Amino acid sequence: MNINPYIGLSALLLSLPLFAKNGIYVGAKTGWVHGHNACENQHLECDNDALGAGVFAGYELNDWLALEAGYNYFGNIRAGYPALGHSNVTATYTGKIQGLELGAKPYWDLNERTSLFAKIGTLAWWTDVTGDEVGYRHSASDNGWSPMLGAGFAIAITDNISARLEYQWFHNVGGSNTGGSSINLLSAGINYRFGFKNVEPNLATNIVAKPHAAPVQPEKIDAMTLQLSDIAGEVLFASNSAIFTPVMVNAVQQPLKRLLDYPEAKVIIQAHTDNRGSQAYNQQLSERRAQSVASYFESKGIAASRLIIDAKGETQPIADNLTDAGRAQNRRVTLTSPAFSVEPPVATEGINQ
């Protein structure tokens, strides 16, 4: 039984979300397609350039590697050949090429907004050729697999949107029925990284103020420190982004409840990074992430005057940056709330909500 290769690749693409840990993005691209040696030697005319387009989706596995899949339409390549049995007549042949690609995409951040990337993978392709011979139309099709290589760079426009320029090479696309050529694709694209909605905390709503028969001393509330890092395998922030993950939203509910319960409470937000990228880039990234935490608290009604931002960048590592485990420990956010005193309530009747 002959199964088209893109059917198997489609099934594999559907399973990719099972492996996603860090970020999900989708995008579209368009650009110039060139089919190398797309026309046979006896051609009379050859137009092996076309306009191509595609869509793609990616899953960031960590801060340097993503899996990316996509659909590519490589346009139509046309050639003219002597018609069969009528060599003085030109028969025009048109080849339509399309395919599904899947590849690994390692990437390197140059600064806060710019990154380089490479791609290696495969293309499940299918081609259709039609030729207008004298008195009839010839049709043929092929499908198969070809290796894919690529490289490019991306520029972040916002935390969610980025643009990229990319070159891809697909080796020997086509078969014995349609003829083969190596496809070159130079494209410009834009992609959108999905953010994460805030998870509303489940805070207690039952408040009871008991009557006091006599004056009491102010209550001393001890200091609280909460240190969060990627070491547990749960990513606090998407790569090169200050957007919360659901892990981060859930993790800050304890200090948020303290701020909501006690108007006297303040929180120092200290953000750290590993040493990947330049020192200036990491300082800016830690500032954005600390501000992101503060903005989340402010969205819950906490005054900015009660939030102190202290961005450290890569300057205070607590582990070795030469290992993945060490870098995970260094990518951390520490929330500290100093001790304070609370005056006793003056209400003498219970209040229930």
Image (spheres, rainbow, N blue to C red):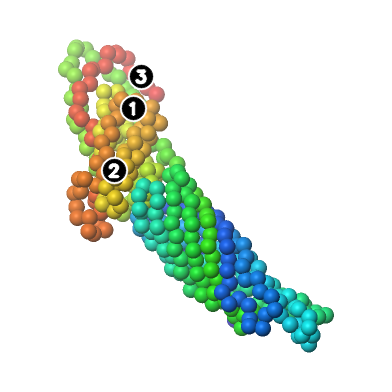
* Quadrant position of residue 290: top left
Alpha carbon separation for disc pair 1 and 3: 29 Å
* Quadrant position of residue 31: bottom right
- The location of residue 198, given as percent across then percent down, is 42, 39
Q: Earlier in the sequence, mark 1 or mark 3?
A: 1
Disc assigned to residue 195? none
Residue 32 appears left or right of 331: right
Q: Earlier in the sequence, mark 1 or mark 2?
A: 2
Label 1 crowd (10 A; few <14 / some 14-19 / many >=20): few
Which quarter of the rendering shows the N terminus? bottom right
Mark 2, residue position: 283
Residue 206 against residue 196 in the figure, above or below: above
Residue 185 against residue 128 in the figure, above or below: above
Secondary structure of residue under mark 3: loop
Mark 3, residue position: 351
The answer to whether residue 293 is visible is no
Residue drawn 39% across the image and 24% down it? 353
Three-letter amino acid code of the residue under disc 1 = Ala
Residue drawn 50% across the image and 69% down it? 169
Residue mark closest to the camera, 1 vs 3: 1
- Most foreground residue, 208 or 3: 3
Residue drawn 20% across the image and 45% down it? 316
Q: Earlier in the sequence, mark 3 or mark 2?
A: 2
Residue 200 appears left or right of 35: left
Mark 1, residue position: 304
Secondary structure of residue under mark 2: helix
Label 2 crowd (10 A; few <14 / some 14-19 / many >=20): some
- The location of residue 5, given as percent across then percent down, is 55, 74
Residue mark closest to the camera, 3 vs 2: 2
